[in-house]
Amino acid sequence: MTEINYADLPKISATINYIDGSVKNPEFFLYDPEPNGRPLPPKADKRQMLIHDVRKYMGLISLDDNGFSFSLQNLPKLNYEDPGIVKTKYYPLCADLVKMETGCKEVYVFDHNVRETGERKSGIFPPARNAHNDYTNESAPARVKELMAGRAQELLARRYAFINIWRPLRGPVDTQPLAICDARTVEFEDFISAHLRYPDRSGKVFSVKHNQSHRWCYLAAMEDKEIVLIKCFDTAGPDIAKYTAHTSFYEPDQPTSPIGRKSIEVRALAFF
C-alpha cells in the first residue's frame, strides 16, 4: 500500500457541500411533487476543504485501498447524448475496463448519466453538488435483486461491488471538476442514509457529514482520455474500501471564459 503524502501535493481550498449532521431522515426530490415546485433539499453544511491534485500518484492509487483509481483510454468518437449508442458502443468498453481493473469474473453495466454545465438540456443533468456515496447497506443488495432478477440470490452470495466509471467528454475540465474523498480518511459514522425521491420510485444514498480528517482529491485540468473509477459499495470485508464520497466543486480561480464541463458516468456491477 502506497501512502499519499498530502502535505507534498499541490492543493486548492474550495467549498464542499456536506449535509448538516442535525438533519433527520433527509430526502432529495428529483421531481416536482407539488404544484409550487419541489421541496427544498436538506440543510447543507458548507465547509472550506483542501482539495489535493493527486496526478503525481495516479498509478499508485487503488480501488481497494483508496476507493478510486485512474485509467487512460482515448475517448471513443460517439454521440454521448444518444442513450442507445452509449449502451451498445460504450458500455462494453466500460465493462472491459472494470474487469481489467478489478480482476472480477463478471461485469453488468446498467445505467449512465451525462452531465453538463450551462444551459439545461433534456436528458442531460447538471453536476452533482452534494458530497455523497451512491449506495447504502440497504439499497445496494436491493439494486442487485432488481437488476439481476432470477440470478440475484446466487450473485448476492458472492463478493460484488458497485463501480462508477467517470470521465470528461471534453477537456481540460475547467468548471466544476470532480472531487473524490480518500476512503481511508472517512469513517462509517460520517455517512447519513438519505432518500432519493423519483416520480415512480424511491432510492437511498449516503449523504456525507463533515469530518476534518477527510482528504479530498482531484486531477487538475482533467482530460477526456483520463478516467476515474469510483467504488460506491463493496462486500469484500473490513480491510477493503467499501464506500467512496464524491462531489463536484467550484475552483476558486475559474477562467473568464471557461469551456464548461461535460462528463459521463457509467454505473456497473462487478461480481467476483
Image (cartoon, helix red, strand yellow):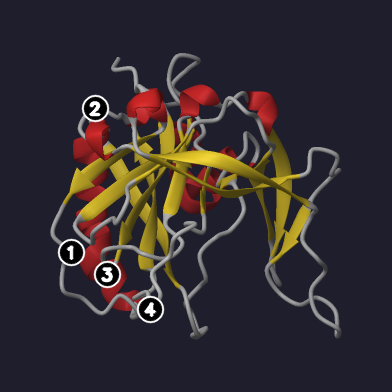
Q: What amino acid type should be assigned to the residue bearing mark 4?
A: Ser
> Local crowd at mark 1 within 10 Å, few (<14), some, or many (≥20)?
some
Report the front residue among 233 and 247.
247
Residue 170, label in figure: 3
Distance from disc 3 to disc 4, alpha carbons, whole Å, reads 15 Å
Q: State the residue position of label 1.
A: 75
Q: How far apart are marks 2 and 1 (CA)?
A: 23 Å
Which residue is the site of mark 4?
A: 257
Q: How far apart are marks 4 and 2 (CA)?
A: 34 Å
Tell me which numbered mark, 1 or 4, is placed earlier along the sequence. 1
Query: Which circle's residue, 3 or 1, is located before the other in the chain?
Result: 1
Label 3 with label 2: CB-CB less than 8 Å: no
- In this rendering, the count of numbered labels is 4
**Residue that mark 2 sits on:** 60
Earlier residue among tags 3 and 2: 2
N-term-proximal mark, 2 vs 1? 2
Based on the displayed image, in which of its 4 quarters is residue 61 positioned?
Answer: top left
Are circles 4 and 2 on residues that touch, CB within 8 Å? no
The answer to which of marks 3 and 4 sits earlier in the sequence is 3
